[in-house]
Image: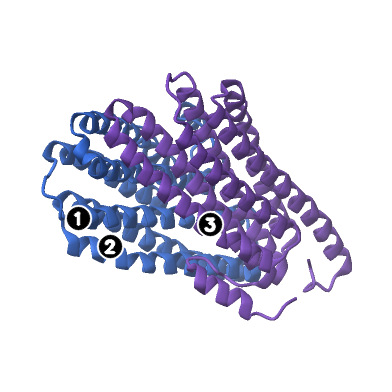
Chain colours: A blue, B purple
Amino acid sequence: MSTQRIDGHISQRFDEEMEGIVSDLLAMGELVTEQTESALFAFIRGDVALAQDVISKDTRINELELEIDDHCIQILARRQPAAGDLRAVVAIMKAIKDLERIGDQAKRIARIAVKLADADERYQKQYGEFELIGSHVISMLQNTLQAFREMDADKALAAALQDKSIDSDYEAILRQNMTYMMEDPRNITRIVEMTWVGRAIERIGDHARNVCEYTIYLVQGLDVRHKDDDQLQAIVQSRPKR
Amino acid sequence: MSTQRIDGHISQRFDEEMEGIVSDLLAMGELVTEQTESALFAFIRGDVALAQDVISKDTRINELELEIDDHCIQILARRQPAAGDLRAVVAIMKAIKDLERIGDQAKRIARIAVKLADADERYQKQYGEFELIGSHVISMLQNTLQAFREMDADKALAAALQDKSIDSDYEAILRQNMTYMMEDPRNITRIVEMTWVGRAIERIGDHARNVCEYTIYLVQGLDVRHKDDDQLQAIVQSRPKR
């Protein structure tokens, strides 16, 4: 990771510290993936105990964010990394913010799961759509983390591009929900809550995409924020492989 | 700003560069405040031209984020700041992400303004609620920037606490919208869009609160993320004044 450094001793210590931070980030990423999966399962199955477990575990995600952030600031202060090393620390500081926000969205879904678990009526068809978008977002999160673990920009690109299918799943949920509301105005409160779940999943996809962008920045030194899918693809694929 | 540094020459250059970054952040903050104000005005008045102006200006906010971020990374690489200086650079890198997201929410409101401008029916009572939450969020944004400009932790605390009234304005809009939908299911699509506007404003309040937290971190060295209002108040006010 630290090809730019000439002082082997400092470099080795830096690498060791960075390895620790990278593995903490991956652990945090796995935790938010689990949280997302559990929150969705709790929502679909009406499992209040599982939803409450998700809500209580969110504190741990917040702590992890602060711990990793603190390690990054310490490494900036003590090791004064340059070039690619500095980029790695900065990318990690940004990525953990997005992971923390994924955790927030999972908690949001879990809270709605608790609220709706007691409702008399279950919308089986609607829950099927949530299973679909849920499987897409979990797959995206897993691929995002794998790309980061392997420091692979092409995999990060592929994971980033998965966001599009989540956006279109969400649009479908939104359209469907409008129809449900018009057909059955008595259930508007419930359907609005279900719409919030769709929105939370859509946001998780956006944050995962951000993590992919930071992975590309870390690996290739390319700032690919605020690009659309075509631009992102063109930029990543035009670079020589490392 | 750089009390910890002993080398006067480096310190002076650092201070000059930091002043540039601080003034860029403030300019970015003023731009997102204007964007929020214009987007809300366009939404309430049905002003399509103004809404389109907001949408087109969002690119400039994204550019500002990348420019300021790049300056921060350069300053980390070249000046290798320590202690309070390092904290300042890190706080600014985080704060601009929240400003950029405020810009995104303003654009979101502007897009809905365009979509709803042609609608036959106007919900005058409802727009009154948006004027209220709008005036609260603009006041919060102005106070957030003033606290940052003056590096004043007490003002940042006061601005952060304004988020609560925005949350309760939003809850009121949400409850009201549920009633409107049940009373008049034909207008559900429209009212759902109006709910998104409320949600966007609520998110702007959250991001402004984050900027206040980073200001407190910058000024007092206190990490006050993930605290509730009472904890935040207790922490900030228990510190000796600087």
Q: Chain of mark 1?
A: A
> Where is residue A204 drawn, in percent x and y?
37, 46
A141 or B112: which is nearer to us? B112
Mark number displayed over residue B163: 3
CB under 8 Å between discs 1 and 3: no
Asked which secondary structure carries label 3, the reply is helix
Quarter of the rendering containing residue B6 = bottom right
Label placed on residue A54: 2
- Residue B108 vertical placement versus B215 (above, below): above
Asked if marks 1 and 3 fall on the same chain, the answer is no
Mark 1 highlights which residue? A42
Q: Position of residue A149 (x, y in %)?
A: 39, 54
Chain letter for mark 3 = B
Which quadrant of the view contains residue A38?
bottom left
Q: Element type at marker 1?
A: helix
Going by the numbered disc 1, the residue's amino acid type is Ala
Question: x, y (%) of residue A163?
Answer: 37, 37
Looking at the image, residue A15 lies above or below residue A227: below
